[in-house]
Image (spheres, rainbow, N blue to C red):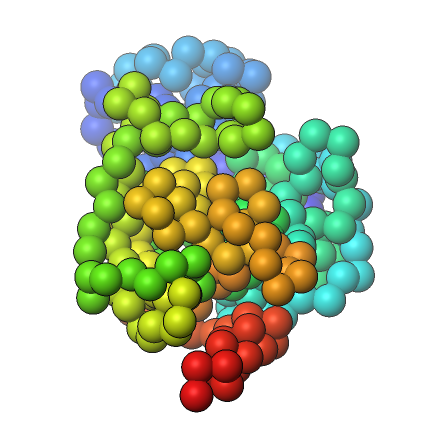
Amino acid sequence: MEERHLTFRIREEGERLDSFLTRQMHRVSRSYVQELIKSGKVLVNGEVKNKPSYKIKRDEIVEVIIPSPRKLDVEPEDLPIEIVYEDKDIIVVNKPQGMLTHPVGRQRTGTLVNALLFHSKDLSGIGGVLRPGIVHRLDRDTSGLLIVAKNDFSHRILSRNLKERKIKRIYWTLVKGEVSEDEGEIEIPLLKGFTGKKLVTPSLRGKEAFTYFKVIERFKGYTLLEVSLKTGRTHQIRVHLSYIGYPIVGDKMYGVSEFNLKGQLLHAKKIVFTHPRTKELMSFETPLPDYFRSVLEMLEKRDK
């Protein structure tokens, strides 16, 4: 993608320069517009204006120079991923267990971002960087559905919708213990920080966190739950269920290691959201992974 030049004539005065350009350019975030202004990429009547707060005046000509997007410092990799849906704005992917959502620390390969960079050839700049826009994350050993934005426009809207709790995410998980209530809500603040081997702990000093659960099926010593989130804190489902006495099976950090599992039996099974461009209500659902179903089948046979 080459450098682009956009020109606007001011019709009304008094608005901030960054607000005006964010409204006019649609697809980009205000923070990216501010970055362009501060780096000298915005001219008013031919003169560089590097203050986002500059108040525009009637009949001024504003020129914006949009540099070609930088490439992300992550290599594309031909990794097997399941694309559930894709169009020019979004990708819905079924992330496998064991795959990081994006590079962290020294691990720069083998992640979902590496795979998406190889798969998608029509990514546009998000915040000036050519990359897939991760709207929300799943833990390495949690499988299931993720929405990925392909441009700044969809990333901005989906991120806002997630923050405003307009994206519905439904998980299935197997926990140790027989949950007595048919459904319930867990409201326990969570604090992120290293305490022994646990990254997240319940604490009154933490951020509010709400988890809803509903029993799908009970087994002898185990319960299959449907879980939905009102908030999306790090490790929220895993910590909440462990705290109330029903740890997730296979969770080596907060749960119980059983059945020789590689990770926790937690699967993002369904996601419902409004498409950022078409405003169509979209719903996707994916079946449980084979290793998850095999444990359930074993429990069913054992209990007969």
Query: Residue 18 at x, y = what percent?
Result: 36, 24
The image shows residue 238, relative to residue 60, as above or below, that is: below
| Of 240 and 55, the residue lying toward us | 240
Query: Residue 233 at x, y = what percent?
Result: 38, 38
- Residue at 23% of width from left, 62% of height from top? 180
290 with respect to 77 (left or right) = left
- Residue at 34% of width from left, 13% of height from top? 54
1 with respect to 53 (left or right) = right
Quadrant of the rendered image containing residue 127: top right
Residue 5 visible in this rendered orientation of the protein: no
| Of 255 and 137, the residue lying toward us | 255
Query: Residue 48 at x, y = what percent?
Result: 51, 14
Q: Quadrant of the C terminus?
A: bottom left
| Of 261 and 106, the residue lying toward us | 261
The image shows residue 160, relative to residue 221, as above or below, that is: above
Query: Residue 70 at x, y = what percent?
Result: 69, 36
- Residue at 79% of width from left, 55% of height from top? 77
Quadrant of the rendered image containing residue 261: bottom right
| Of 103 and 177, the residue lying toward us | 177
The number of numbered discs placed on residues in the rendered structure image is 0
Residue 211 visible in this rendered orientation of the protein: yes
Quadrant of the rendered image containing residue 116: bottom right
50 with respect to 275 (left or right) = right
- Residue at 66% of width from left, 53% of height from top? 99
